[in-house]
Amino acid sequence: MYIAQRGVPRRSAMWVSLKTLSAACLVVSIAAAVGSIADVIDALKIIVTCIEATAQFTYVSYSSIVMVLLS
């Protein structure tokens, strides 16, 4: 938006710098999104494991579920 508003000429040093900064920000954002999705998948695996572990017992207190999640 800044490039268009200020009329920065194409292929100038300022134009290349701003485009490079924009591309770098995009790469960082994509990496963060991938890491976030990976964390969610790991968390879901832990939750499924806890549910399977608690399904083996007839009575499990909430504190033991919390302890399993925190370990």
Image: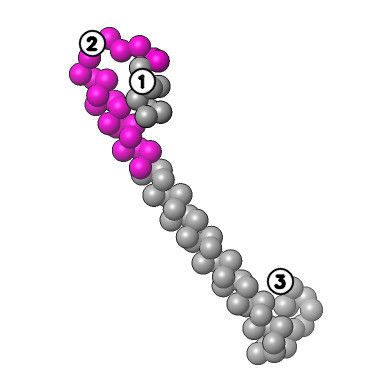
Cβ–Cβ below 8 Å for labels 3 and 1? no
Would you say 28 lies left or right of 57 here?
right
Q: Name which residue lies at 34% across and 31% down.
A: 47
Would you say 65 lies left or right of 5 here?
left
Q: Amino acid at mark 3?
A: Met
Q: Quadrant of residue 23?
A: bottom right
SS assignment at label 2? loop
Q: Amino acid at mark 2?
A: Thr
Q: Which mark is residue 58?
A: 2
Relative image position of residue 22 (x, y in whole percent):
61, 71
Q: Name which residue lies at 39% across and 15% down.
A: 62
Q: Which mark is residue 5?
A: none
Measured Cα–Cα span from mark 3 to mark 1: 51 Å
The residue that label 1 is drawn on is 65
Asked if the magenta segment contains residue 29, the reply would be no
Q: Residue furthest right?
A: 6
The residue carrying pointer 3 sits among few (fewer than 14), some (14 to 19) or many (20 or more) residues within 10 Å by Cα, namely: few
SS assignment at label 1? helix
Identify the image quadrant of the N terminus: bottom right
Asked if the magenta segment contains residue 54, the reply would be yes
- The tag earlier along the polypeptide, 1 or 2, is 2
Relative image position of residue 10 (x, y in whole percent):
67, 88
The residue that label 3 is drawn on is 1
- The tag earlier along the polypeptide, 3 or 1, is 3
Give the magenta range: 42-63
